[in-house]
Structure formats: C-alpha cells, structure tokens
Amino acid sequence: MNDRVQGTKSEFTPQLEEIRAMARQDVAVARERLAEGRDMVRDYVAREPVKALGVALCIGVVLGWLIKRP
C-alpha cells in the first residue's frame, strides 16, 4: 500500500509543481493589477476630491440600504 501511495505521489509531483508555478504567476499578475488599480484610484482622488467623496457617499448609501433591507 505504501509503495502505491509513493508511486502515485511521484507520478503527480511534476503536475503539482506546474500548477504551483502557474498559481504563483497568476498571483503576481493579480498583485500587479491591484497595484495599478490602487494607483488609479489615488490619482483620481487627488485630481477630483469632491467627485470621489460623492462616489464614496453614494456607494455607502447603497450598501447601507442593501444591508438594511429585510
């Protein structure tokens, strides 16, 4: 039984390493996109503080309304 488990483990190890590498790459891309989005939001807030405050207020009102609904 132990030999079968070890054989199965060695059989899937290369595939697991490939999946891990793809996951690391996807995480790196996601972090990069989040950083770009964060920078875009910061720039927008710096350029248009009143509009940004209005958007935040509207989002807060809508979320509050959705949470409060029975």
Image: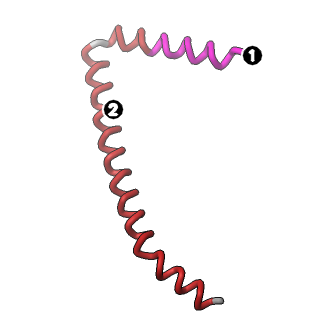
Q: Which residue is mark 2?
A: 38
Q: Is residue 55 above or below residue 25?
A: above
Query: Disc 1, disc 2: CB below 8 Å?
Result: no
* Main secondary structure type of the part rendered in magenta: helix
Residue 34 badge:
none
Q: Secondary structure at mark 2?
A: helix
Rendering coords of residue 37 (x, y %):
32, 32
Q: Which residue is mark 1?
A: 70
Rendering coords of residue 54 (x, y %):
42, 9
Determine if the magenta segment contains residue 69. yes
Determine if the magenta segment contains residue 22. no
Rendering coords of residue 47 (x, y %):
25, 15
Question: What residue do we see at 70% from left, 14% from top?
Answer: 69
Q: Quadrant of residue 14?
A: bottom left
Q: Quadrant of the C terminus?
A: top right
Question: What residue do we see at 54% from left, 81% from top?
Answer: 8
Q: Amino acid at mark 2?
A: Arg
Q: Is residue 66 left or right of residue 13?
A: right
> Label 1, label 2: how many angstroms apart (C-alpha)?
34 Å
